[in-house]
Amino acid sequence: MRPIFPALALSLSLSLTLTAMAGAQAAGEDVSVAASESGATEMEAVDPMEPRDAGELTLDEFLWIARPVIVFADTPADPRFIEQMELLAARPDPLIERDVVIIIDTDPSARSAIRTALRPRGFSLVVLQKDGAVGFRRPSPRDVREIIRGIDNFSYRQEELRSGGQ
C-alpha cells in the first residue's frame, strides 16, 4: 500500500522505531536484537499510526480489533485536514495505547465504503468504538488530548481498564 503522506509516514515510523529502541535500551536489551525481533530494519519499520486510505478498507476489518479514527475532507489540501493530520502525528503514543488506527478519505468522488457508511460533509473527524459504533464526530480538527479523553469514556475502554488491559 502506498503511504498517503510519505513525509508524515516516515516521521511517524522513525519516531516509533526510536521509541521502541529507547525502551529496549532502558530495559537493558540489545537494541539491534530488539529491532530485528520487531521486524524493523534501518529503512523499514511497521507503523501502526500510518494513515490508511479508506478506499481500500471496510469498517468490518477493525471490529473488536482497533478504534478507527477517520479523517474526512473534500481534498487533501483542506487546511483543516492538514491541521488534523499534524495534530495526530504530534502525539502518536496515547493513540497507540488505545488501539487507534488512522484512516483518511479525501476523495468524495471515490465513494469509499467507509464514506458511504458514515456520510460526512466536508471535513469531519469520526472516532469509532471497537464494536463499530460511532463514538463521536467533530466538524473541526481536535487535538490528541481531546480524542483520547473521548475514547477513555467509551464503555468498552472502561471495561479494558477495569480488566487490566491497556
Image (cartoon, rainbow, N blue to C red):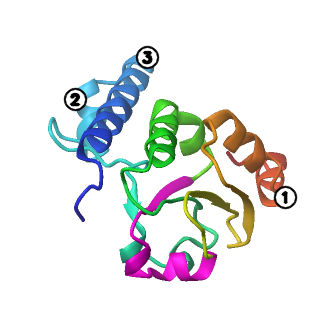
The picture quadrant where one finds residue 66 is bottom right
The residues colored magenta run 100-118
Give the amino acid type for the residue marked by disc 2 in the picture.
Ser
Q: Quadrant of the C terminus?
A: top right
Horizontal and vertical percent for residue 40? 24, 42
Say the numbered circle drawn on residue 26: 3
Q: Residue at x 56, y 80 (%)?
A: 60
> Crowding near pointer 1: few (<14 within 10 Å), some, many (20+)?
few
Horizontal and vertical percent for residue 113? 49, 82
Q: Nearer the viewer, residue 50 or 96?
A: 50
Horizontal and vertical percent for residue 163? 80, 51
Instruction: Give the structural element (helix, strand or loop) at label 1.
Output: helix
Say the numbered circle drawn on residue 32: 2
Judged left or right of residue 133, residue 13 is: left
> Crowding near pointer 2: few (<14 within 10 Å), some, many (20+)?
some
Q: Nearer the viewer, residue 95 or 87?
A: 87
Quickly name the residue at label 1: 155
Instruction: Give the structural element (helix, strand or loop) at label 2.
Output: helix
Residue 11 position (above or below residue 126): above
Q: Residue at x 63, y 60 (%)?
A: 126
The residue positioned farthest toward the left in the image shown = 43
Q: Residue at x 36, y 76 (%)?
A: 56
As for residue 133 lying within the magenta part, the answer is no
- Pick whichever of labels 3 and 2 is earlier in the sequence: 3
